[in-house]
Image (spheres, helix red, strand yellow):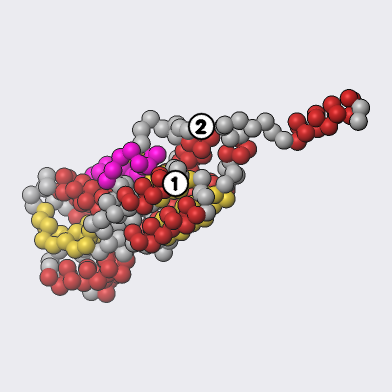
Amino acid sequence: MSNKARLLIAAAFTFAVPFVTGTATKAEAAGGLISIIVNDPANPYWLTEGKVAAAEAERLGYKETVGASKGDTNTESNLIDTAITNKSVAIILDPANASGSIGAVKKAVAAHIPVFLVNAEINEQGLAKAQLVSNNAQGAALGAEQWVKDVGQKGNYVELLGNPADNNAATRSNGYETVLSQYPGLVKVGQQVANWDRTQGHNKMQTLLQAHPDIIGVISGNDEMALGAIAALKEAGKLSSIKVGGFDGSPDAVAAIKDGEMQYTVLQPVAVFAKKAVDEADEYIKTGKTGAASEKQLFNCVLITKANVGDYTAPFTLKQ
């Protein structure tokens, strides 16, 4: 073979095979599987969370899969194991339990898979690369202030609480209390845990209404529980005299506001931070950094009432 032929072959090989170093090329980094684990897609909030994250992963050139823990740490652990087996390049996780999910995150970290938490936190810093959550204290204050405007400053009321294993439940309840304690004429006469669920909200509202038929309002930790309460109040013929407030910004809550059945909801920007989590995962895969100033990142909530409900354009999104 002539020297000229050898040079031509060598040149062709050089262009066909990219130069490999210890750092992956951008094209290589943009591939691979991102595993997304939400709570329960039967809830439109978590459904949107998974859909938005999956769409962003696909847009950035990744394969994606969405699984659901349904709030069960054993299921979550199995999903993490699957993500590890499938050699995921990143995991987007809405943790099932603030303390109980720590072990699952540690497994992923031990397998050298970066984890990005959305919506809910875990009770340990330094494991996940990022924790992106709504500013629940700020949102609860917005909701409580509006609730007082709707129900007035005097009367008995009840509260529906979310899953106690989720830090968001306590943060919202404490946020409500911080505002409502400023009005001594408002008395909380009962509260029930309804675990973010519409059916439980309905059943717990029936129980609360039987015990406290004179209430003037219901303040709820999320929209699904509030919508369950509204159904129970309609059955009892009391919705016209008992005001209900929610939290999430779900499409059904928006419809209830338009129909005059719910006073307000607090929109969590889940579509924003679900997308942002995938963007930060992509940045970390490519550069080893998320691009964010801190692990925990708070996203402010927005109040939706009859006055601005027309600005609601898509699930969990308002016109800018």
Region of the chain picked out in magenta, as a range: 123-144
Left or right of residue 286, residue 146 in this image: left
Circle 1: element type: loop
Name the residue: 30% across, 47% down. 122
Question: Which residue is the extreme one toward the bottom?
Answer: 235
Q: Position of residue 72 (x, y in %)?
A: 34, 62
Which residue does the numbered mark 1 point to in the structure image?
111
Name the residue: 46% across, 38% down. 280
Give the foreground label among 2 and 1: 1
Q: Quadrant of the C terminus?
A: top left
Name the residue: 16% across, 45% down. 178
Q: Position of residue 190 (x, y in %)?
A: 13, 62
Q: CA distance from mark 2 to mark 1?
A: 19 Å
Q: Position of residue 222 (x, y in %)?
A: 30, 56
Circle 2: element type: helix
**Rendered position, 126 above or below 212:** above
Question: Which residue is the extreme one toward the left?
Answer: 184
Which residue does the numbered mark 2 point to in the structure image?
287
Q: Position of residue 180 (x, y in %)?
A: 15, 48
Residue type beneath disc 2: Thr
Question: Which residue is the extreme one toward the front?
Answer: 1
Question: Which residue is the extreme one toward the right?
Answer: 2
Left or right of residue 3, residue 296 in this image: left
Left or right of residue 142, residue 51 in this image: right
Residue type beneath disc 1: Ala
From the viewer's side, name the closer residue of 260 and 227.
Answer: 227
Q: Quadrant of the N terminus?
A: top right
Quick check: is 188 in the magenta stretch?
no
From the viewer's side, name the closer residue of 194 and 17.
Answer: 17
Name the residue: 39% across, 49% down. 107
